[in-house]
Image (cartoon, rainbow, N blue to C red):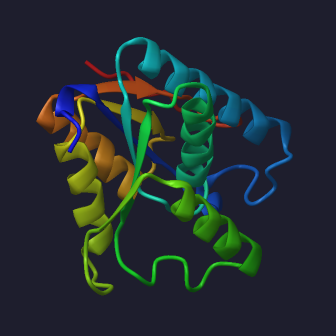
Amino acid sequence: MAARQESCCFTGHRPGKLPWGMDEQDRRCLALKARIADAVEAAYQEGYRHFLCGMALGCDLYFCEAVLELRDRHPEVTVEAAVPCPTQADAWPADQQARYRRLLAACDTETMVSARYTSSCMQRRDRYMVDRAALLIAAFDGSPGGTRYTVQYAMERGLEIVDLAIPGTDFSCVFP
């Protein structure tokens, strides 16, 4: 298991909360993906080698793709898929299910946080990642939900937080 001080996790919104929805060719989405890639590279330069991803639709998958590209350049990087439950992607569009399976297969490890779906399995996954990391990269617009929960939990746990402003929103977090 990777040491907490060299582990980084991520939180970000699903497409329903992103101004571009599922249109990943939108210039704002491309800009966010570039920010994620830059943040992942900066984390690597700071000594982070293990990256935990919650594998949710949207920003999590962008993060996973960025870290896998980083691992292509730096083979010592490891990627852990923190999956909340076995049915996480079952209701997703077919193309996104295929993407999920491809990314999951490319990860170095997969941790199934709950054996079945429960009303709290997503939060358990988020806590699992934060409890094992020293850095949180967040693509967050300030709205209530799982991303806000994860950012607040990371703040309580004393993680360093890198805020990636979401293009097309006016919100920017200010972290202590």
* Quadrant the C terminus occupies: top left
Identify the image quadrant of residue 154.
Answer: top left
Q: Answer above or below: position of 75 versus 90.
A: above
Q: Kindly identify the residue that appears in the image at 53 percent across and 25 percent down.
A: 74
* Residue 169 appears in the rendering: yes
Q: Position of residue 143 (x, y in %)?
A: 45, 50
- 35 to the left or right of 42: right
Residue placed most toward the observer, 15 or 116: 116
The answer, for residue 145, to whether it is visible in the render is no
Q: Is residue 57 above or below residue 77?
A: below
Residue that lies at the very extreme toward the front in this rendered image: 75
Q: Nearer the viewer, residue 122 or 113?
A: 113
Percent coordinates x, y for residue 94 in the rendering = 73, 80
- What is the total number of numbered labels drawn onto the structure image? 0
- Viewer-closest of 98 and 59: 98
Quarter of image, res 83 = bottom left
The x, y position of residue 37, in whole percent, is 61, 29
Quarter of the image for residue 118 reads: bottom left
Residue lying farthest left?
157
Residue 150 coordinates in the image, percent (x, y): 30, 48
Q: Residue at x 54, y 38 (%)?
A: 67
Indicate left or right for 155 with 57 as reference: left
- Direction from residue 131 to residue 18 in the image, left or right: right
The quadrant of the rendering that contains the N terminus is top left
In percent of the image, x 24 and y 74: which residue is there? 120
